[in-house]
Image (spheres, coloured by chain):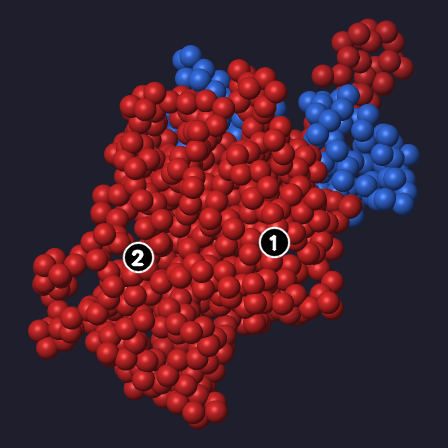
Amino acid sequence: MSTHDLEDMGCGTSSAKSDRQSEKVLKAALVIQNWYRGYSARLKARHRYALTIFQSIEYADEQCQMQLSNFFSFMMENYTHIHEKDPEIVSRLFGSTSQNNEDKQDYIRLIEVPDSYKGPRLQFPLTFPDIDLLVDAFKQQQILHARYVLEVLFETKKVLKQKPNFTHVTTSPSKEITICGDLHGKLDDLFLIFYKNGLPSENNSYIFNGDFVDRGRNSIEVLMILFVSFLVYPNDLHLNRGNHEDFMMNLRYGFTKEILYKYKIHGKEILEILEDVYTWLPIGTIIDNEILVIHGGISESTDLDLLQRVERHKMKSVLMPPVPLDGDRHTTLKKHKINAMAMPREVKSSTSMSEQLTKHEWEQIIDILWSDPRGQKGCYPNTSRGGGCYFGPDVTSKVLNRHHLKMVIRSHECKPEGYEICHDGKVVTVFSASNYYEEGSNRGAYIKLFYDMDPRFFQYQVTRTTCLKPLYQRISAIETSAIRILRERIIARKTDLIHAFHLQDLSKSGKVSLGQWAFSMENTLGLHLPWRSLSSHLVTTDTDGNINYMSSFQDIHIQKPVKEAQSTLIETLYRYRSDLQIIFNVIDSDHSGLISMEEFRSMWKLFNRHYNIHIDDCQVDELAERMDLNKDGSIDFNEFLKAFDVVHKLDKKHKSKSSFA
Amino acid sequence: MTQEILLAEYHKKIKEAFEVFDHEANNTVDVREIGTIIRSLGCCPSEGELHDLIAEVEEEEPTGYIRFEKFLPVMTRILLERRYRPIPEDLLLEAFEVLDSSKRGFLLKEELIKYMTEEGEPFSQEEMEEMLSAAIHPESNSIHYKDYITMMVIDES
């Protein structure tokens, strides 16, 4: 409050005038402040809404990924054709890839690094200068030669194999530990962390808590820096496995593509060894016998003693749960009500009981990699992601007490401030990829643990430009990006949405109430979002406040690779694009990018049945035939899927996203 | 629209806005976010009025968190009574013109800072910096308030 008013009272007309003036100034200031605070709050809320959209869609995608697991089981039980022609598929999905170590090593040694190669040259055994060399080289955007990539992977696997499932570390007065969360291929964030906190060394210990790869464009560079640092300081740099250290996840979320793009000749070999290296990553770290550091979370049945004993390398992928064998098969088949005629032959695989984890062991690991903490008490299946569970504060207390621990440090979830504390201080989330969804979406953070002190948090955010745009422009950009991907989801379900709207609008007037619109959107898309608040971005409203529901389908459409193809077919193929990509990649065991028309047809039939899609086989056949451009009986499935892309009518310039996903 | 349906719609709208800030999904939000939630629903209480509202929705013994059950009836009432209506554009322009006593059409950076941080319900340093980053004309170091207002209005529509 201004001090003028009360003091100058009763001192004559000139001060009365200045009183009135200062009162006007006071009121004017109040108006502006009031308006600004309202505006600023609405900006903050818009930011939050955008993040909610990004997160919902991300988790819905993960759910799809988990559902693929069911499809693969279904496929294996019904795809007799593949059994006959390609027993490789079975071993790919359910068995272990035969890795003859000596052969691999010889193969690697045969790869020559030409003199013309101007990138970084590593010297084995690796030493600290190699870390520096790599960081400098990657800052100049050089690519590490495949020979070195393979050697690093090979050596890393050897050293990781000697590590237990949980590494025990201790802090001491001279030794502090830094814990980093998800990096997801964001090299700039890793550089920023090293800049602020120093490179790893015997006195500068690090724990990287999983999800080093996927989504960002420098996953391989991040991985190489981490692995090289690990090889130089195997007792001071600790790596925990995340849910993205999984070759099936890499297929969907971009790392596989990145490798095949950057390493056109040796990409396949890199992918093969990588698959194996992942399985040898430890499950977690325990600090001072007090703090459990794991990627995802826990469940009420989490049993660290069991997890310490488990043969962790048998956990190949979240999409490859243990298969019931021999005697169990018949029960499984009966469960799926498979037609007797479609009974497959004996599965010729090298899978035996000893090569798999038990179901219980597998679930224990899934819980560690996929679970999320929540405020509600109890332990519930994590329906957003489709795997792991939601665990409440009571579960945390119980599990921590059971194992005489005090705290869980985990990652796995993007937080606007880079970190978040919950469950009464017992659970800490740390996430190290700033700008994860979009430029400006969130900060990154890391935790420092000092001897006998509370954890300290450090935040940062990578910025592309030296001069930051004003806040409203940054938030506007994030908002636009979020709405854009949401509209892509909407167009992918156009037919189902219109059907849902018609149920509410029997006269087909084209209008429904806001409540009816929100209900239909939420139910059809399966995304829990603040629809009422978002409606102004997605639809037009008439003067009575009713929604013109068809307006969300304007300004955006899915390309049609072939004119005559029906819209339901196009929508379905667009919607399942990622799933189909993974399935095709699995069928294409030699990574050629091609599958035969026969394989495509059989696979499609199965897909149709399992996902309950009502599309005539002949329609897809026709489409595929048109796509077989060189008429040689094989389909380039990447081209096939690329054809189903969304076009935003109001896109003036082609916006190319800088990720491989 | 019947009163019942209107009320149900208000409830859903309030729940949506609340949930976005309910990070642990347990029907509570940090008390420091209440102001943002109320304002995101289109209301513009002053800082003083906000303070009173928080007192209304807080627990007997403040925990730092506000529960949805306490927030909903209070917020519903505010919406029904159409309290804390936003400042119309023309009134905002008038306010700037009052501060611009010599009617130049702009305010100098130092002048705006003085008014915003010394008068009314003063800005924090963060709020001041934020406002300046968008409002300041980099070359002249002044705020051409008419353009600024237009820009903000467009951004929100």
Query: Is the residue B146 above or below the residue A580 in the image?
Result: above
**Cα separation between marks 2 and 1:** 27 Å
Q: Which chain is blue?
A: B
Res A432 quadrant in image: top right
State whether residue A324 appears in this view.
yes
Badge 2 density bin: few <14, some 14–19, many ≥20, Cα 10 Å: some
Res B19 quadrant in image: top left
Q: Which residue is mark 1?
A: A221
Quarter of the image where the N terminus of chain A is located: top right
User: Which secondary structure lies at badge 2?
Assistant: loop
The residue type indicated by label 1 comes to Glu
- Residue at 37%, 44% in the rendered image: A370
Res A378 quadrant in image: top left
Q: Which chain is red?
A: A
Q: Which residue is mark 2?
A: A320
Chain at numbered mark 1: A
In the image, A387 versus A284, the foreground residue is A284
Q: Is residue A637 left or right of residue A206?
A: left
